[in-house]
């Protein structure tokens, strides 16, 4: 390998003029959370191959938009980090390059995380972390997580006393993200797939039999005084952190507040619903290679040998506290029950749909849940109306 000179590794604030992909030099865009771990990996890569690497610190929310603007002009990066649900838009716009990685390396990653970054049989991202919801419970009120959702309902009803401000179980509403496990347990989905394996934006499954049954379960929770209208994020997490809520569906982002409140808690998979595993939306973070990179082979080498390591993946975990998608790193956290529970939930999950049309789904779906929880509309009619609104919005016949 040619020696490209003295190692150049820096962390910069975004001032991207002049930071163009050029042969023999890697540019990586990442947010401030991931920058320290990537900088250390970049230093090792430079020491091994003499290839300069610049780790450019970009606000997370700006990475996708800046790539679209700069990459076609030759001013963009070689590698970016981001969530898997960016890839549909980025692929449509010709901005991502499929990865070329050996099968034995990919076998060391959670299969669900690889599925999330796959499109039409190609892999477009190397995963590093997963994220989803699970059942979080107060061990002082529920010593062991319920084995079935029916058991969860019975426990919740016994612990619910609204006159005392006490509740057994809540799902924040109206919130499609947190409610989706009820739909998916019965076979509900958002978008179906084409014969090529990509998502079909006109195959809307929110009013299929499974989705309606999930909505009926939500309706039952309301009718049986378990769920109540107005149970938003602040209400649900506030009640739990005050010791007034026994169980809720939530993600790892709720744990800092729980720790601060001193709640004796546990995390478990959402229990089976009529024998079916609820499948939450899973988000996956990963590394992607720009289609405009002048260094695609070097970028793949950097991913394969310097980022897909236990040390780097654990360093990223320490900063973000999300389950590693790299299984050797996850195994190192075997004594962390929270991470293992969220990882197990993610392994059963369905990747968040990764096409731009997903942005058109949330409003109508949320409105349907609001109508169900407020008892203003039945679940079948609410879900049918939502699906029809989405089809109309997307121009589907």
Image (cartoon, rainbow, N blue to C red):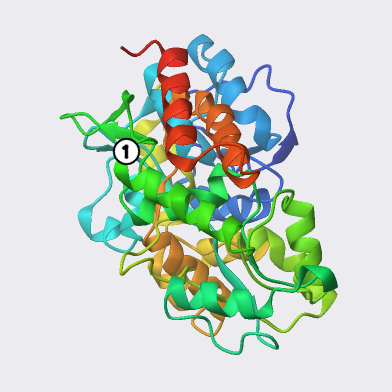
Q: Position of residue 201 (x, y in %)?
A: 35, 24
Residue 28 visible in the snapshot: no
In the image, residue 199 sits, relative to residue 309, either above or below, namely above
Above or below, comparing residue 183 to residue 153 in the picture:
above
Residue at image location 45% in from the left, 22% down from the top: 390
Q: Is residue 329 left or right of residue 208?
A: right
| One can see residue 120 in this view | yes
What residue would you read off at disc 1?
A: 208
> SS class of the residue under badge 1?
loop
Q: Residues within 10 Å of mark 1 (few under 14, many from 20)?
A: some
Q: Nearer the viewer, residue 107 or 10?
A: 107
Q: Which residue is farthest left?
A: 195
- Of residue 147 and residue 289, the one placed in the foreground of this image is 147
Q: Quadrant of residue 104?
A: bottom left
Q: Position of residue 279 (x, y in %)?
A: 40, 56
| Displayed quadrant of residue 194 | top left
Quarter of the figure with the C terminus? top left
Q: Residue at x 79, y 77 (%)?
A: 243
Quarter of image, res 203: top left
Q: Residue at x 69, y 41 (%)?
A: 10
Q: State the residue at coordinates (76%, 66%).
A: 256
Q: Does residue 122 lie above or below 156 as drawn?
A: above
Residue 250 higher or lower than 229, as above or below:
below
- Locate the N terminus by quadrant: top left
Count of marks, rendered view: 1
Q: Position of residue 89 (x, y in %)?
A: 44, 23
């Amino acid at each position: 390998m040619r020696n490209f000179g003295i190692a150049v590794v820096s962390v910069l604030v975004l001032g991207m003029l002049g930071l163009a992909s050029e042969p023999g030099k890697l540019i990586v865009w990442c947010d401030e959370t991931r920058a320290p771990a990537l900088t250390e990996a970049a230093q090792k890569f430079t020491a091994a191959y003499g290839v300069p690497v610049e780790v450019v610190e970009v606000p997370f929310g700006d990475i996708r938009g800046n790539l679209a603007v700069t990459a076609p002009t030759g001013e963009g990066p070689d590698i970016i980090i981001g969530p898997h649900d960016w890839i549909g838009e980025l692929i449509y716009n010709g901005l991502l390059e499929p990865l070329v990685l050996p099968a034995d390396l990919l076998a060391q990653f959670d299969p669900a995380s690889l599925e999330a970054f796959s499109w039409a049989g190609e892999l477009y991202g190397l995963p590093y972390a997963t994220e989803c919801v699970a059942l979080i419970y107060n061990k002082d009120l529920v010593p062991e997580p319920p084995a079935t959702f029916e058991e969860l309902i019975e426990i919740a009803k016994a612990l619910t006393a609204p006159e005392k401000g006490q509740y057994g179980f809540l799902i924040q509403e109206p919130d499609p993200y947190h409610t989706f496990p009820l739909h998916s347990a019965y076979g509900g989905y958002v978008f179906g797939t084409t014969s090529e394996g990509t998502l079909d934006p006109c195959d809307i499954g929110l009013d299929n039999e499974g989705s309606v049954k999930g909505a009926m379960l939500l309706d039952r929770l309301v009718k049986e005084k378990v769920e109540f209208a107005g149970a938003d994020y602040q209400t649900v997490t506030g009640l739990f952190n005050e010791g007034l809520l026994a169980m809720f569906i939530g993600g790892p982002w709720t744990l800092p507040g729980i720790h601060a409140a001193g709640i004796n808690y546990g995390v478990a998979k959402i229990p089976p619903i009529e024998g079916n595993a609820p499948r939450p939306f899973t988000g996956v973070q990963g590394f992607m290679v720009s289609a405009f990179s002048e260094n695609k082979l070097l970028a793949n080498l950097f991913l394969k040998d310097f980022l897909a390591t236990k040390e780097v993946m654990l360093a990223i975990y320490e900063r973000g506290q999300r389950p590693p998608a790299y299984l050797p790193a996850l195994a190192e956290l075997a004594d962390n029950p929270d991470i293992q529970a969220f990882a197990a939930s993610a392994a059963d999950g369905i990747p968040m749909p990764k096409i731009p049309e997903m942005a058109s789904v949330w409003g109508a779906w949320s409105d349907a849940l609001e109508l169900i929880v407020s008892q203003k509309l039945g679940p079948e009619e609410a879900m049918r109306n939502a699906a029809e609104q989405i089809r109309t919005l997307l121009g589907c016949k």
